[in-house]
Each structure stands twice: as structure tokens, then as C-alpha cells.
Image (cartoon, rainbow, N blue to C red):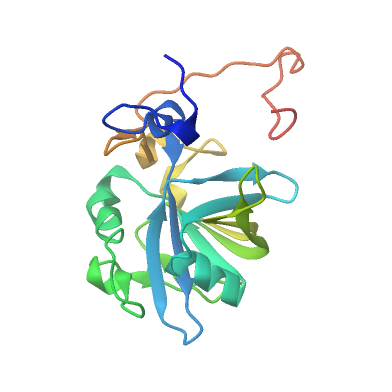
Amino acid sequence: MFYEPKHGHGLPHDPIKAIVAPRPIGWISTLDAAGRPNLAPYSYFNMVHNRPPMMAFGSEGLKHSAANARATGEFVFNLATRPLFEAMNATSDSLPEGVDEFAAAGLAAAPCRLVRPPRVAASPAALECRVVQAMELLDTEGRPSDGFLVIGQVVGVHIDARFLREGRFDTVAARTIARCGYRDYTEVATMFEALRPTDRGAFPPEGGKG
């Protein structure tokens, strides 16, 4: 099968989201201009740079999280895990502007150190970010797509010490979840380690060529 997205795929559901999977879930907390908290998950999300650490999330339409991050210059990534799935899923609801998703999902908020938005207190890890770039995406014809990309530099990191094992964050113990397209998700249950040809027996360096 081959198709050009501009002509449609002819399938009941779009396969691209399932092909590019699993994808980390960007559980993003922000404050609006009035100081009201917002919390929502984004599946168009990932780390994009290492030194300094930067992450990005994409929004189809200028939704609250992207609009808030652009307006205030700050956001927080909260790690989504299997025990927090129901609450995370609840924060994906389309609630009116200004409604506190923390309260709606029954989540306790915790203060951050360097940015104003709160973090999810129960999350095993949270990354405080300051926006370095925010833009509307253009298509190949240079036309606005109504898709928005927000890139933030990580300026602060919170880690629950229970999930540190011999100096590493234990993704399996944290029960990190990811989006697999459609309405499917997965939990990280197994991992394997592999060295690069350039590692020469050392632990794989972070970053590098990707």
C-alpha cells in the first residue's frame, strides 16, 4: 500500500499515528495570563535537544496549553504513568477556559522552583521549562496549518528518589506509559541495553548522534 496524505488513505483510521509509536506523552501544566492552572496531555511530544535539554510539544489548534505557554513563556512536563492514567485521561477533556484540570481530575498540585506553573505532585518526575521558541507550522506550500509547536528549555528537574536505581531513573519501576495511536497506549514493562560501536565498552553517552 502507498498513499499521499493529501489524497487520503482510504482506511477507517489514520495509520500514521500508529506507525510513529509509541510516543511519549507530554502531560503539560501551564498557567494562563490570569494565573489559573491548566493541565493537558499531548501525544505530539518529545525531547529534541540535549545540551541544553529541550523538549517540544505540538498542538492541533491553539489549545489552552500552547496558548498559555506562548503567553507566559513557561510550562512543566509531568511524567504520565500507569497509576496516573485515569487522571491523565480525565485532563484530556475539553473544559472551558479557566477551569482547573488539577481539581477536575482529583490531582494534587505541587509548586515548582524556577517557573510559576504547578506540577503534578504524584508524578515520579517533572521538568520545569522556559519557552525558547513557539511558532505556527506551515505546510509545503507555505500555508498556515493551524498546528502550533512550542519548544522549551528544561531549567529544573524533579525526581521522586524512589525511582532512582544506582544513579539511573528506573522507567520500568515508574510504569511510564506511551501513546500508540488510535486509542491505544502501552506501559513500559521491559527494557534492553545495547552499546553503540563508538562506546568502546563504556556506558552509552547521552545525546550524541541520533
Q: Is residue 73 positioned above or below 127 on the image?
A: below
From the top left corner, tell me how far across and down residue 134 is, in percent.
64, 62
Quadrant in which the C terminus is drawn: top right
Residue name at image x 64 percent, y 16 percent = 195
Q: Is residue 195 above or below residue 166?
A: above
For image coordinates 24% across by 59% down, the residue present is 90
Q: Is residue 19 above or below residue 166?
A: above
Residue 19's x, y, as percent? 43, 26
Left/right placement of residue 74 relative to residue 196 reads left
In terms of depth relative to the viewer, which is nearer, 134 or 118?
Answer: 134
The residue shown at (74%, 31%) is 208
- Residue toward you, 148 or 105: 148
Task: Give the image location of residue 179, x and y in percent.
Answer: 37, 38
Q: Is residue 69 left or right of residue 34?
A: right
Please state the total of marks drawn on the protein image.
0
Q: Quadrant of residue 87?
A: bottom left
Q: Residue furthest bottom?
A: 34
Q: Position of residue 21 (x, y in %)?
A: 43, 30
Quadrant location, the N terminus: top left
Above or below: residue 60 compared with residue 171 = below
Give the camera-side residue of 138 and 82.
138
